[in-house]
Amino acid sequence: MPHYDVVALVLQGGGALGAYQAGVYEGLHEAGIRPTWLAGISIGALNAAVIAGSPESHRVGRLREFWETICAAPVEWPAHEGLAGALPFTFDLRSARNTAAAMRALLTGQTGFFKPRFPPPFMSLFPGDAGTSFYDTTPLRDTLNRLVDFDLLNAGDTRVSVAAVNVRNGNIVYFDTADRQLRAEHFMASGALPPGFPAIEIDGEYYWDGGVVSNTPLSRILSSEPRRDTLTFQVDLWSAKGRLPSDLLEVWSRQKDIQYSSRTRAITNHMLQMQKMRQALQQLMAKLPEAAKNDQDVMAIADLARHQAHNIVHLIYQSKAFEGHSKDYEFGLHAMREHWQSGLDDIRRTLSDPRRLHRPAPEQGMITHDVHRETRVS
């Protein structure tokens, strides 16, 4: 693989669909690619915590343990894969199984993740978490503290950045190991989607899921200073493109896709415009007399115009025909394993063409690859 100063893994929020990201990481791991910077929001932040907080040889195993834990069911759905594959209406079985998993999550919570409040918040006589959220996320804190070595996560070998929203002022905040020690609470805050989950208190402020404002931390990577040559694997769980809905359930599903899609294309288009500006500045400065190039202001502009290579490998989870509006909280084991395998298949297919990891030419500056579109945009 060509050398890059930074290899970043950017993980979007998307609830149960986050197992797709775990599959992508497994494929990167087996290919010998080790991210040096993990950035996540919501479930992407939780995946980042498990990866960065595990010894390198245990990362895939810990990810699987995390997902097997939070998707475990008291009673396994009776329609096993063998039966489902033998019947002509497989998709109906899968849809029913996923719907049952979603209903179980809503009514009973998920082991090691969240549990319903009794009484529910609209019947609560108490303020605070009990009156402002439907679920208690204390089990998630226990799971993170069991599976994540926070001393290792904060050791500095791998940078970790996770986003949350300050409830009081509405601003997005990045909790970053570059400037603070992260605890379980920082990752829980990134995934505290209201009104399901309660705001998380950190140093006297309260935070919600970063996806309330922006569901991707890609801009954190691309705008970091000092600018460095970067290979970024952007793993999205919602697709901005989709078909016209035909009923209300499809409307709900399509609304989620649009609302939580990462706007990756808008971000990369902005960065491409910035790259063109830098190229124009470089051309202008080449025409300056040598004496002028030593001026402090000109030297500052020269630094801004300095070329850096950005290669963005973009993977987007592709919804299945049998998945509906509840796909982000269908925490069934079968659905989880299918999502995981989809991510593994997609990254293997992506990496099968080594050209996708090549550094962009100097005149390009930034290049993006999307295995699903099978095109290269620059």
Image (cartoon, rainbow, N blue to C red):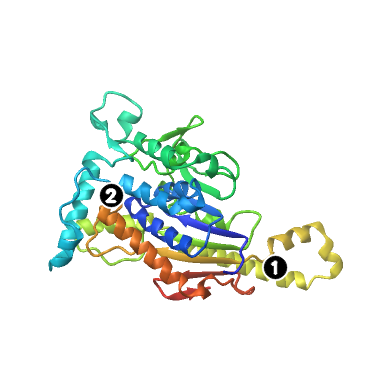
Give residue 12's quadrant in the image. bottom left
Q: Which residue is mark 1?
A: 281
Q: Which residue is mark 2?
A: 331
341 relative to 201, above or below:
below
Image check: 71 left or right of 100?
right
Give residue 201's quadrant in the image. top left
23 relative to 349, above or below:
above
> Residue type at mark 1?
Leu
Whether residue 317 appears in this view of the structure is no
Q: Give SS at disc 1.
A: helix
Relative image position of residue 62 (x, y in whole percent)? 41, 49
Q: CA distance from mark 2 to mark 1?
A: 51 Å
Local packing at callout 1 (Cα closer than 10 Å; few below 14, some 14-19, many 20+) is some
Whether residue 5 appears in this view of the structure is yes
> Residue sitting at 45 percent across and 38 percent down?
184
Between residue 74 and residue 61, name the one nearer to us: 61
Q: Give SS at disc 2.
A: loop
| Mark 2 or 1, nearer chain start | 1
> Residue sitting at 23 percent across and 49 percent down?
102
Between residue 166 and residue 59, name the one nearer to us: 59
Query: In the current view of this chain or complex, which residue is farthest to the front?
Result: 57
Image check: 209 left or right of 94?
right
> Residue sitting at 53 percent across and 58 percent down?
34
Q: How many marks?
A: 2
Question: Of the residues tagged 2 and 1, which is closer to the observer?
Answer: 2
Local packing at callout 2 (Cα closer than 10 Å; few below 14, some 14-19, many 20+) is many
> Residue sitting at 26 percent across and 66 percent down?
244
Between residue 161 and residue 248, name the one nearer to us: 161
Dots 2, 1 in contact, CB < 8 A: no
> Residue type at mark 2?
Phe
Q: Quadrant of the N terminus?
A: bottom right
